[in-house]
Image: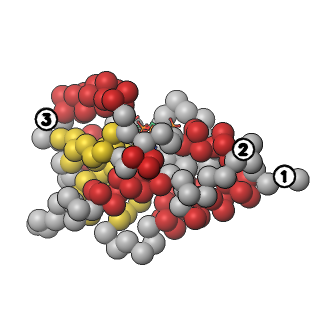
Amino acid sequence: MSSDKIAVYPGSFDPITMGHVDIVERGLRVFDRIVIAVAVNTSKTGLFTLEERKALIEKTFESYPNVEVALFEGLLVDFLRMRNIKSILRGLRAISDFDYEFQIAGMNNSLCPDVDTVFLMTSQKYYYISSSVIKEVARFGGNVSELVPAPVYEALSTRFAKV
Ligand code: COA
């Protein structure tokens, strides 16, 4: 059996931002491998399809052999069970994230007691961004090039190109 320390980093990633990249990079100081898991079922309507989000994340981390990207459907803990992974990685941006994260981590631990959530602080540089904010700024022509990985910037520019 592999003794690698592995974590799942879940989210909707519509699209992945530098804030998420920052958490993955910090996470790789703690874990040997990270599986970025794109949730199939969320109440959010997406700008990018699931396959597009997955492809953008793969492109972003193409030089990282220890980062894998997967789609998951249903409960996150079932995905962890299926993969025999015991750690969830989550980022905290501000105190306002705490209540929600506390609730989800508690629920996941109650559903699967041997699963724990590890929280890392997002860099101050990115604490104010979210995927929605990025999409809104890009839609109206604002410059988000420093806030998203290059493949995402390209995809947003194409999506919101003036015709
Ligand atoms: N940097 C920048 N932005 C960040 C960030 C970071 N470090 N961390 C989070 N965000 C942003 C996300 O982009 C997202 O933006 P958006 O709302 O504009 O799309 C927002 O903060 C919320 O992120 P997050 O809390 O990760 O929500 P999510 O929708 O991306 O993911 C799931 C939530 C998928 C992890 C959660 O719903 C889940 O596990 N679902 C599976 C079903 C399940 O098991 N439910 C039981 C758990 S109670």
Q: Which residue is disc 3 drawn over?
A: 113
**Label 1 to label 3: alpha-carbon separation:** 50 Å
C-beta proximity under 8 Å, tags 2 and 3: no
Q: Is mark 2 within 8 Å of ligand 1?
A: no
User: Residue drawn at (21%, 48%), measured in percent from left and top?
Assistant: 87
User: Residue drawn at (12%, 41%), measured in percent from left and top?
Assistant: 114
* Badge 2 or badge 3: first in the primary sequence: 3
The front one of 118 and 141 is: 141
Q: Secondary structure at mark 3?
A: loop
* Badge 1 or badge 3: first in the primary sequence: 3
Q: In this rendering, which labeled residue sits more in front, label 1 or label 3?
A: 1
**Residue 2: where, in percent of width, then height?**
14, 67
| 101 lies above or below 127 | above
* Badge 2 or badge 1: first in the primary sequence: 2
Q: Secondary structure at mark 2?
A: helix
Is the residue marked by circle 3 packed among few (<14), some (14-19), or many (20+) residues within 10 Å? few
Q: Secondary structure at mark 1?
A: loop
Q: Which residue is disc 1 drawn over?
A: 162
User: Residue drawn at (45%, 47%), measured in percent from left and top?
Assistant: 126
C-beta proximity under 8 Å, tags 1 and 3: no
Amino acid on which the number 1 mark rests in the picture: Lys
**Residue 122: where, in percent of width, then height?**
36, 47
Q: Which residue is disc 2 drawn over?
A: 139
| 97 lies above or below 161 | above
Amino acid on which the number 3 mark rests in the picture: Pro
Amino acid on which the number 2 mark rests in the picture: Arg
Q: In this rendering, which labeled residue sits more in front, label 2 or label 3?
A: 2
